[in-house]
Image: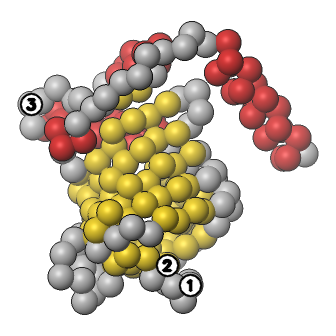
């Protein structure tokens, strides 16, 4: 049942993307996008979101020893370590600058930045779907998806009284902007 529903949703999104007008390439200087706090020692900055595909792109910056709680991916996540070292608590490998990661839908893991880092760790992450954070108390989950990520980023820009240099598909930018004003 679920797989049939996912196939239908995927087919509909593909058809919608094929029917939509081709858009010109865009550019944003991510250095103009402020980071916002997302837990102890963790900051994010989101610079792209697309409601048609559920994709959002962001940097994760973490101090040495920081932990991003256990979460489940509902879609694919691809990442590139730009600086520092980290690992999943559940694995025996460590990623450092230049390493590429690929996470499959349904994967559950806990990101831990190595305590002996001499600098912050910075990741570039492209997330399709959402990250569902699993609480140890089993009282439910918190979800980070393209719309909640966009809301958090817009709030960070608004707090600094700045225009958010946030990219989205041309025909969906108003939808994202309107949803962040709720």
Q: Are marks 2 and 1 in contact (CB under 8 Å)?
A: yes
Q: Nearer the viewer, mark 2 or mark 3?
A: 2
Q: Is residue 77 visible?
A: yes
Could you classify mark 1 by the number of other residues whose Cα lies within 10 Å: few (under 14), some (14-19), or many (20 or more)?
Answer: few
- Separation of marks 3 and 1 at Cα, in angstroms: 42 Å
Which residue is under mark 1? 91
> From the image, which quarter does the N terminus lie in?
top right
Residue 116, placed above or below residue 21: below
Rendering coords of residue 64 (x, y %) = 24, 79
Rendering coords of residue 176 (x, y %) = 41, 25
Residue 65 as seen in the image, left or right of residue 48: left
Question: Is disc 2 placed on a helix, strand or loop?
Answer: strand
Pick the front one: 47 or 156:
47
Could you classify mark 2 by the number of other residues whose Cα lies within 10 Å: few (under 14), some (14-19), or many (20 or more)?
Answer: some
Which residue is under mark 2? 88
Question: Is disc 1 placed on a helix, strand or loop?
Answer: loop
Q: Residue at x 9, y 31 (%)?
A: 161
Residue 83, placed above or below residue 56: below
């Amino acid at each position: 049942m679920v797989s049939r529903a996912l196939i239908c949703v995927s087919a509909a999104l593909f058809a919608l993307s094929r029917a939509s007008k081709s858009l010109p390439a865009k550019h944003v200087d991510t250095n103009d996008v402020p980071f916002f706090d997302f837990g102890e020692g963790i900051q994010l900055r989101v610079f792209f979101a697309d409601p048609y595909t559920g994709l959002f792109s962001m940097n994760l910056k973490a101090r040495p020893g920081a932990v991003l709680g256990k979460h489940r991916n509902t879609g694919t996540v691809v990442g590139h370590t730009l600086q520092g070292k980290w690992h999943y608590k559940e694995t025996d490998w460590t990623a450092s600058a230049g390493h590429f990661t690929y996470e499959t839908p349904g994967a559950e893991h806990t990101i831990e930045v190595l305590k002996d880092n001499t600098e912050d760790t910075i990741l570039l992450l492209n997330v399709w779907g959402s990250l569902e954070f699993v609480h140890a108390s089993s009282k439910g989950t918190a979800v980070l998806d393209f719309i909640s990520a966009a809301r958090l980023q817009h709030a960070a820009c608004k707090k600094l009284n700045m225009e958010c240099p946030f990219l989205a598909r041309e025909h969906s930018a108003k939808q994202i902007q309107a949803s962040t004003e709720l």
